[in-house]
Each structure stands twice: as structure tokens, then as C-alpha cells.
Image (cartoon, grey):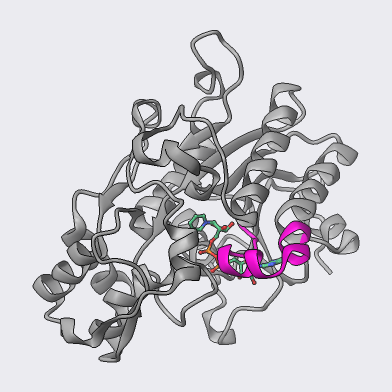
Amino acid sequence: MVSPHVHSDILITGGCGFLGRKLILSLLARTQLPGRIVVLDAFPPSPPSTAISHDTVPIVYRTGSILDTKVLNEVITSSTTCIYHLAAVVSAQAEQDWNLGMQVNFDGTRAIAERCLELGIKPVVVFTSSLAVYGGEVVKNCSEDSHIMPQSSYGAEKAMCELLLSDLSRRGLLDARILRLPTIAIRPGKPNAAASVFISGIVREPLQHKQKTVLPVDEKTLIWIASPRSAIKALVHASVVPRETLVDAQGSRRSVITLPGLSTTPRDLIDAMVRVGGGDASLVEKKPDPKIEAIVGTWPGDIDTPWAKSLGFEVDKNVDDIVKIFVEDDMH
Ligand SMILES: NC(=O)c1ccc[n+]([C@@H]2O[C@H](COP(=O)([O-])OP(=O)(O)OC[C@H]3O[C@@H](n4cnc5c(N)ncnc54)[C@H](O)[C@@H]3O)[C@@H](O)[C@H]2O)c1
């Protein structure tokens, strides 16, 4: 049971996942500390020793689903001022199981919004969308202003959430800041069910585990990536970007920000892995997988993002830095 708290609460859904855990640490490293952090995830921290605690900021872990009304009623209260909504079923899994993807990725987001409406609170909602909302021929010459045409159920679900949260923000009922994230690499730990999982695998497995790994797409495929450090910095920055700057040239509310990223290829990443970390490139086995190629091939490999940059969102310098960040932060 999550008891009501007098201070302002930050809720992080999916807070035990890859980005969620790093986000908690980053919020705790800021000079302006939150009153309390509530972490909702379908799974508890694993292993339990990875649960984060803090001397002065209470961190409350609630294991449960965003689809459970009772759970949402507990974690979103009149004290909730900011929600980082990260909980999601990732790309390959959402493609395989349409019902699950629609429920968690869309119905779950709607349930969170409706709970806020019911309480009459207007929190800042930082939502993690994805480059997977783009698709079709625009991916060859893509900008943050290109129209969206998702070519996967995951991308479609993220696009639907973008519209839902944008409309509620236009109506002044929420204050959504929607970030279209590049693929975040290098992801530590076990591979997940994202179609992009190989992008981290081709660095992590040879370097950290000295194990073979598969590259399921052509090594020259353009990919759009950012480091976890950049992604977390962007999530926190999104929560404080002044509301009045989130408008287009006509003054209409603009809630969707396509994050700047780095355009590179698996080949460049493998070379950086060898150069920076001294890993063995022969552990990367080239084995095309039409299912993965079909999803990843529809994502843009480069996106022009002048508006996001003007709002202060930053980009990693180069692929060597992406590998260095993994070595420094996660390769222990
Ligand atoms: N990592 C990336 O490359 C990337 C790229 C683009 C967008 N995103 C988005 O960023 C967000 C975070 O990504 P991540 O890499 O940390 O993913 P992750 O899979 O590591 O974490 C997601 C978390 O959500 C939780 N979750 C799933 N269903 C839930 C439910 N019904 N109720 C409560 N919790 C639930 C999972 O247990 C998991 O801990 C996701 O929304 C993802 O779609 C990530």
C-alpha cells in the first residue's frame, strides 16, 4: 500500500527497467531533490539488492501493472506533480502479441491519463515515444517535422499515445512532454524483446561477456542511436523545459520532441568496440533475420532535429563515446 504523502511525488512507471533505474539515480543526483519517488513496475527490482534508497528522499516501490485501477489509484494521488511514463511492451514483443501491446502501451497510457483527470491534477507527464513512429519513404530523408507512418504495432501504439497526450495538453488538462527516443545503446544486462536489441549486443557481448552474438541486419544499415546518459539527461530536461517554449510558429501547443541522436552503422559500432574496448570483432556473427530486418529497416537512420536542439536537447559526440559510456557506467 502506498500511503499519501504531503510532499510532491514523482511517479516513474517501468521504473525497474533499463532507463527507469538510471532515471531514479539521476533524479537523486540533482540539487533540487523531489519530495518522494514512487516506482511502479510489473516486476520488483532484480536482484532485490538493486532497489535504490536515499537518505532523505523516500523511494517507494510498488509492484503491479499500470492496467490495474487499484494500483493506479494508489500511485497517482493529489500529491503527484510529475509522471515519467516509461512502462511498455517493447517492439518485437508488441509485434508478436497485438493484444498485449495495445493493452500495456495504449490502454495503460490512457488509464494513467484518466486517473489524472479523475483527480483534477495536471502533472508534467514525460512520455517515452520512439523513432518507430516514423516509417515509409520519409525515413530516407527524415526530420522532426516529417509525417508519421508507423510500420509496426509498437510504433502505432506509441503514435496513438502521442496524439492522446498531445490533445490533453492542448486542452490544458495535462502537461505532456513526449520524447521520441532513438535506440538507446549500449543496454547492459540480458537482451530484451526489442527488435533493436542487437545494436547493444554487438558491443556488450564481445566486450563484457566475451561471447558470440548475432548481427541480424546488414552491417551498413543506418541506425539512429543515443547513449543512456543522453537519454536520461533528456528525460530530466524535458520535465523542466518551460511550457511556453512547447509551441509551434503559430503558437499551437507542440508536445512531441524528436530527440537528437547519432546516425551510425553496426559496422561503425563494432569498430568502436574494438578500438575503445579491445573487444574481439570475430565474435559478431552476421546472420540476416528477415523478421528483424523488416522492423528495423522501416526506422529512420538519421533525423534532422533543429527544434529539439534549440530547446537544449543534446546529442552524443561519436560512437567511441557511446562505447566509452558503456565501459564507464555499466561494464562491471
Ligand atoms: N531503450 C530504448 O532503446 C528505447 C527506445 C525508444 C523508446 N523506448 C521507450 O522507453 C521506455 C523505457 O525503455 P527501457 O529500455 O527502459 O525498457 P525496459 O523494458 O527495460 O523497461 C520497461 C519496464 O516496464 C515494465 N512494464 C511492462 N509492462 C508493465 C505494466 N503493465 N505495468 C507496469 N510496468 C510494466 C517492465 O517490467 C520493465 O521494467 C519504454 O517506454 C520504451 O518503449 C526505449
| Residue 79 shown left or right of residue 291 in the figure | right
Q: Is residue 110 above or below residue 296?
A: above
For the stretch drawn in magenta, what is the main secondary structure?
Answer: helix
Q: Give the position of the N terminus as an image quadrant.
A: bottom right
Relative image position of residue 203 (x, y in whole percent): 27, 75
Q: Is residue 294 at all visible to an observer of this figure?
A: yes
**Residue drawn 74% across and 33% down?**
122
| Residue 308 shown left or right of residue 95 in the figure | left
| Residue 46 shown left or right of residue 42 in the figure | left
Q: Is residue 100 magenta?
A: yes
Q: Quadrant of residue 160?
A: top right
From which residue to which does the magenta span run? 86-103
Q: Give the position of the C terminus as an image quadrant.
A: bottom left
Q: Is residue 183 magenta?
A: no
**Residue drawn 59% across and 60% down?**
57
Q: Is residue 85 above or below residue 99?
A: above
Relative image position of residue 233 (x, y in whole percent): 40, 48
Q: Nearer the viewer, residue 136 or 231?
A: 136
| Residue 56 shown left or right of residue 222 in the figure | right
Relative image position of residue 99 (x, y in whole percent): 78, 64
Q: Quadrant of ligand 1?
A: bottom right
**Residue drawn 77% across and 55% down?**
108
Relative image position of residue 154 (x, y in whole percent): 62, 56
**Residue drawn 29% across and 44% down?**
315
